[in-house]
Image (tube, rainbow, N blue to C red):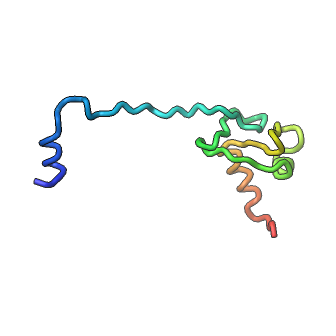
Amino acid sequence: MGFKAKARKHRKDDDSDKTVSKKKSNQGELMCAIKDCAKYADKKLGGRSLSLDNALDMWGESNFTPFKGRVRVCKSCYRSWKKENKNDDMY
């Protein structure tokens, strides 16, 4: 008998040791700044922040809403921007 089996054997049978865990919701607070997108741009959901110049190059002038000089985008919009600009030399 291994140490885990012994621990299970001697563990209390009552429910006092078990913790109740809440399921995380995919509901965010900050919407994606791209007009056609309905996802959330929260950092915990994979959202990122792009500069205005980068957003202008990708989506045009009227397809996003800036917030404090930056554009908050969701994970899928960021990935599409990253894919488009992967081969651009920034140096």
Identified at 80% across, 66% down, the residue is 90
Taking the image as shown, residue 28 lies to the left or right of residue 24, namely right
Q: Return the x and y of residue 38 as percentages of the image width and height.
A: 69, 32
Which residue occupies the foreground of this view, 36 or 47?
Answer: 47
Q: Return the x and y of residue 30 as percentages of the image width and height.
A: 68, 34
Q: Residue furthest front?
A: 16
Identified at 17% across, 43% down, the residue is 8
Identified at 81% across, 70% down, the residue is 91
Q: Residue furthest left?
A: 1
Q: Residue furthest right?
A: 61
Taking the image as shown, residue 44 lies to the left or right of residue 20, namely right
Q: State whether residue 21 is above or below residue 57.
A: above
Q: Return the x and y of residue 86 as percentages of the image width and height.
A: 73, 61
Q: Count the marks: how many?
A: 0
Taking the image as shown, residue 43 lies to the left or right of residue 86, namely left
Which residue occupies the foreground of this view, 73 or 10?
Answer: 10
Residue 2 appears in which quarter of the rendering? bottom left
Residue 46 appears in which quarter of the rendering? top right
Identified at 87% across, 44% down, the residue is 60
Which residue occupies the foreground of this view, 18 or 76?
Answer: 18
Q: Return the x and y of residue 84 as percentages of the image width and height.
A: 76, 56
